[in-house]
Image: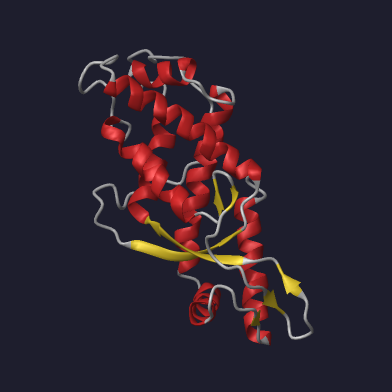
């Protein structure tokens, strides 16, 4: 058996949900729901961007041979996918973004629920990040992949980054699954009809759908942290 090219990094078996669709870019964007994202989630995106920029610079400056970087790291494919995902998140690089709702979700007694945002994510971009996660954790990947993890200017350890990018890919894939649930369809329809700055008073049925949806989102974006 061929020896690993670099020291393997253990990734939990279920960390990366294998996403088959979209690497050829034919899948259309998916409009789904997303809660406010905390800084812990965003720190993973920052660190992944730092790593991907390392590969981009090496490729642009000729520090690696043409074709040495494997897909989807080559030709900025992964970096471009990450930037498109950045553009739709409820937070921006500088803090809270003017993306999504600024109005409030209210119960009929005036109780204010945590916000939900409508975001349109391209399934091809999610599939690309899923492929990146698998590649970073593959000890048989080309040597340049491991070299980037060891030498790139990233703000967390390579081991932590690999595991957390795997979780990130699973979290984002879960958004696509969420979009097809009946509860998400109820809430999406209500959000679409309201202006972004308009307060929404949820009906009892919509409140129940909201609570079930937030339970799923918290399990995805909180418990996985």
Task: Pick the residue in front: 77 or 129.
Answer: 77
Image check: 164 left or right of 214?
left
Is residue 125 among what the camera can see? Answer: yes
Identity of the residue drawn at 58% across and 23% down = 157
Identity of the residue drawn at 41% across and 16% down = 147
The quarter of the rendered structure image containing the C terminus is: top right
In the image, residue 206 lies at what x, y percent?
A: 62, 81
Is residue 225 among what the camera can see? Answer: no
Task: Pick the residue in front: 174 or 119.
Answer: 119
Placement of 205 over or under 117, stated as above or below: below
Placement of 166 over or under 36, stated as above or below: above
Identity of the residue drawn at 48% across and 65% down = 32
| Way the structure is coloured | secondary structure
Task: Pick the residue in front: 58 or 134.
Answer: 58
In the image, residue 183 lies at what x, y percent?
A: 55, 75
Q: Quadrant of residue 42?
A: top right
Residue at the limit of the structure toward the left, as seen here: 66
Task: Pick the residue in front: 95 or 49.
Answer: 95
Marker count (numbered): 0
In the image, residue 54 lies at what x, y percent?
A: 40, 24
Placement of 159 over or under 130, stated as above or below: above
The quarter of the rendered structure image containing the N terminus is: top left
């Amino acid at each position: 058996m061929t020896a690993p090219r670099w020291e393997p990094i253990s990734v939990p078996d279920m960390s990366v949900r294998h996403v088959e669709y979209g690497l050829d870019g034919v899948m259309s964007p998916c409009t789904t729901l997303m809660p406010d994202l905390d800084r812990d989630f965003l720190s993973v995106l920052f660190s992944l961007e730092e790593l991907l920029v390392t590969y981009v610079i090496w490729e642009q400056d000729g520090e690696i041979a043409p074709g040495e970087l494997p897909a989807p790291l080559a030709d900025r494919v992964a970096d471009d996918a990450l930037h498109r995902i950045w553009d739709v998140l409820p937070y921006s690089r500088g803090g809270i973004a003017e993306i999504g709702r600024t109005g409030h979700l209210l119960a009929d007694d005036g109780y204010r629920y945590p916000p939900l945002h409508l975001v349109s994510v391209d399934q091809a971009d999610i599939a690309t990040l899923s492929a990146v996660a698998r590649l970073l954790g593959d000890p048989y990947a080309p040597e340049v992949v491991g070299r980037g993890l060891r030498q790139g200017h990233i703000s967390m350890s390579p081991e932590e980054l690999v595991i957390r990018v795997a979780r990130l890919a699973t979290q984002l894939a879960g958004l696509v699954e969420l979009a097809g649930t009946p509860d998400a369809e109820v809430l999406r329809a209500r959000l679409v009809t309201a202006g972004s700055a308009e307060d929404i008073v949820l009906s009892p049925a919509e409140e129940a759908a909201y609570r079930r949806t937030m339970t799923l989102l918290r399990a995805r974006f909180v418990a996985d942290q």
